[in-house]
Amino acid sequence: MSLNPTLVRVPGTGELSLAPPGTPEPTDPAAPLLAPWSGLGLSTEDGVTIRRAVERSGTTHWQQITPARYIYTSQELTVASVFQETRGIVLGAYFGGMTFTETAQGSKKYRAEISSAPKGDERALCVDWVDQVSATQVFNHRLYIPRVEVSETAESQWTRTQEARWGLTFAALSPASGTTLAVWLTNDPAVLLAAPSGASLTAATDSKEKTA
């Protein structure tokens, strides 16, 4: 057994940020994101839900019932959260790229139109979270996805007993070039601790079989 409680990570706080598609990958996971990145602000205590779904189908054969190989048919990477700040960038993402403009200069009145014809609203996304174990152990994690689009919006209920909430699910789009769907940046040394390789596990199994 290789148990190590010091490697348990708790995403104590974090934030989601959006930028125009194609915004370059940040290089420092601990550095604040600068323009053109814009944070989406407070979210509910449920935080962020990351989901990766890979679908595949096995080949079928006359001579055997076990697949000889699998054919991958789809892959989906999504990021979901419920936001609590009614700010322009949140509303814009929720309503498919809607933007507010001042009705007249200096009027302090703002207007936006919700289109009857939905269209793509592509963005770049960063998910940041921090685990502060102690004053000297602060681990930053940042998930960067160069191309995302809102794939689902949750119902938003407006009542006098709860703040307005905006549930958004962002789905990664295929990269403009290459095969990198997303990038994980961190200063956490725990990610370098790997499990035993398949080769060593196989060797250990063979050794046990020979001595049995």
Image (spheres, rainbow, N blue to C red):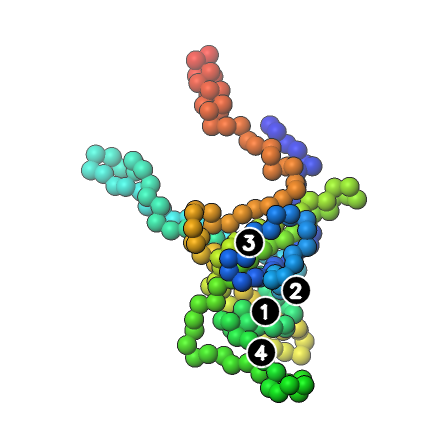
Mark 3 and 2 residues: CB-CB less than 8 Å, in contact?
Answer: no
Mark 1 and 3 residues: CB-CB less than 8 Å, in contact?
Answer: no
Give the label, 1 or 3, closer to the camera: 3
Q: Is mark 3 on a helix, strand or loop?
A: loop
Residue drawn at (68%, 55%), measured in percent from left and top? Answer: 32
Q: Is mark 2 on a helix, strand or loop?
A: loop
- Along the line of sight, which residue is nearer the eye, 175 or 77? 175
Residue 86 in sight in this render: yes
Q: Is mark 4 on a helix, strand or loop?
A: loop
Going by the image, does 55 lie left or right of 10? left
Residue drawn at (65%, 40%), measured in percent from left and top? Answer: 188
- Mark 1 or mark 3, which has the lower sequence index? 3
Which residue matches tag 3?
Answer: 24
Give the label, 3 or 2, closer to the camera: 3
Q: Residue farthest to the top?
A: 211
Quarter of the C terminus within the rendering: top left
Which residue matches tag 2?
Answer: 41
Which residue matches tag 1?
Answer: 90
Residue drawn at (65%, 70%), measured in percent from left and top? Answer: 85
Which residue matches tag 4?
Answer: 100
Q: For marks 2 and 1, give the CA distance.
A: 9 Å
Q: Which dot marks residue 207? A: none
